Amino acid sequence: MTQARPRFGCIEAGGTKFVLGIAEAHGAVLATTRIPTTNPADTIAAVIEWFKANGPVDAIGIASFGPIDPDPASPRWGFITKTTKPDWSGTDFAGRVGRAFDVPVGFDTDVNGAALAESRWGAAQGDDVAVYFTVGTGIGGGAIINGAPIHGAQHPEMGHILPRRHPDDLDFPGVCPFHGDCFEGLVSGPAIKARWGASLSELPADHPAHKIVAWYLGQLAMSVQAVLSPRRIIFGGGVMATPGLLEAMRSEALRLAKDYVTIIIEPPALGDQAGLLGGLALAQAAFTTGQKPWV
Amino acid sequence: MTQARPRFGCIEAGGTKFVLGIAEAHGAVLATTRIPTTNPADTIAAVIEWFKANGPVDAIGIASFGPIDPDPASPRWGFITKTTKPDWSGTDFAGRVGRAFDVPVGFDTDVNGAALAESRWGAAQGDDVAVYFTVGTGIGGGAIINGAPIHGAQHPEMGHILPRRHPDDLDFPGVCPFHGDCFEGLVSGPAIKARWGASLSELPADHPAHKIVAWYLGQLAMSVQAVLSPRRIIFGGGVMATPGLLEAMRSEALRLAKDYVTIIIEPPALGDQAGLLGGLALAQAAFTTGQKPWV
């Protein structure tokens, strides 16, 4: 009797859409779909329905928007905690999925998942310390140390560091409902739209927004380099698709660091797939440990 | 035949003095001494002489001022790299000590060592993520993840993050030779003396310096909480001995974080011994791995 290769359910749970997939391994994605993120009950029901139709799976990994509780020892493991997203605060998410299938479930932030995927199969292979940022609807950072995502008291919230303000950008109060002008409040997609009326890629190449955004993101890279000393920092997400931005922020980061630390900034090698493959990496880890924290 | 308990050589290598010790375990420190930090040749010779007189030792741990190269795979492992301390840039330090005794040698930053000691025997026991700061001659931060110090590309340099400036403290250019007004350039001991002409504890309790320093250190704690999500952050060093400072920076950190993340700030449980016991923790780790990177 031969043992079939394990099949993994992968979930990239975003604030506007969920991407679902079944995979045997990176590169062997057997099926995928997208569903809109509506209210928790309907969205989670649609997730369960799709995996029932496309299963069976041997483990499930969820790379989710946050904040979340990723601690398997916590009674609130698997919950979305106090998010700004309407209706989702206090939602039991991963536990509900796990109970529906009774297979091991991994649950982490979208950016910890993407960082794990990039460190397994992407730009950060072999790095003992790796960081992944997404700059889009919000700004989030995930980190992998010696193969495992950082958790600690909860999980990183790197977008909420308070930056030094750019001298030509002192008046804008920022859009973060918690901190106003943290990095997320100043240079996430919605912050750029609120300040300049368009997305960064829609603004002309000589618009001062390009310099200002690159300067803030370079500062963010420098701050994270000083704390974590990563081998490289990967920047993905919608805002990073702006032509020239990655190169401009590289220069700003090195200029701010004054040659005291080396900072290597790269785009994600897995591109759009980093999120879904984050779910895969989390599913594989859960399959190994067999964790069913809801039991 | 009975095996004697291993004896460890412990070195806390500071910019103004070295503390040396022989220990069997935490709490069983058999001998200690202090020597002034002069030029590299004389200082390292004095270290070797003292251990020859007080030995033998089965492993040595060095918790050193930096920047350093702590990577056992690097040809420059054991070196002090480009420090602002005169004469010490490019000094082969740990290798010279190791070759003199031919025992395993652990080598890390003073703050990574202290963080390791606090996570073994002090305030951070059992924490999966722990951070230790010293605020004194400089500002340095070390971090332990799942029992091991962070290295990555080099090691953390947390004092060199660029803070947001306090509204009542916009003019002072800062004293960091690299960055001017990074955290170290603004609120290390020398920065406080340069700005206000006295140490913080010498200034009257109603002097605005107290509020300003607490605000910056609270901001530093918040930034590091956002990146690393530590269970707690330990703040030690000369400046932290100022009465009321720890309590004041706790309030500032929580106020800045706006209740989005929890931040727990504590003094070192090991007090002045955190540095020397950092050397002990590094010696024990080297004893286990048997590392002799100079061979």
Image: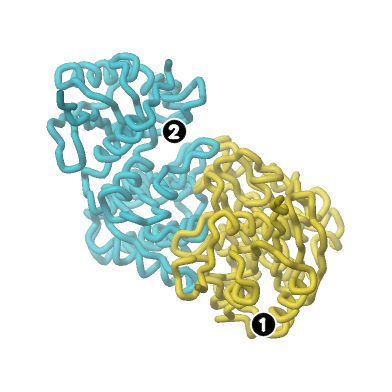
Chain colours: A yellow, B cyan
Instruction: State the residue in front, A9 or A260.
Output: A9
**Residue at x 53% of width, y 63% of height:** A291
Quarter of the picture containing the C terminus of chain B is top left
Q: Position of residue A212 (x, y in %)?
A: 70, 56
Label 2, residues with CA under 10 Å away: few <14, some 14-19, many ≥20: many
Element marked by disc 2: loop
Side (left or right) of A149 relative to B196: right
Amino acid at dot 2: Pro
Amino acid at dot 1: Pro
Q: Nearer the viewer, mark 1 or mark 2?
A: 1
Location of mark 2 (residue): B67
**Residue at x 50% of width, y 20% of height:** B75
Say if B25 sits above or below A44 in the image.
above
Instruction: State the residue in front, A192 or A63.
Output: A63
**Residue at x 48% of width, y 39% of height:** B151
Judged from this view, the residue extending furthest toward the left is B30
Chain hosting mark 2: B
Location of mark 1 (residue): A40
Say if A116 sits above or below A96 in the image.
above
**Residue at x 79% of width, y 52% of height:** A28
Label 1, residues with CA under 10 Å away: few <14, some 14-19, many ≥20: some
Report, in whole angstroms, how far the alpha carbon at label 1 lies from the one at label 2. Answer: 49 Å
Q: Is residue A226 visible?
A: yes
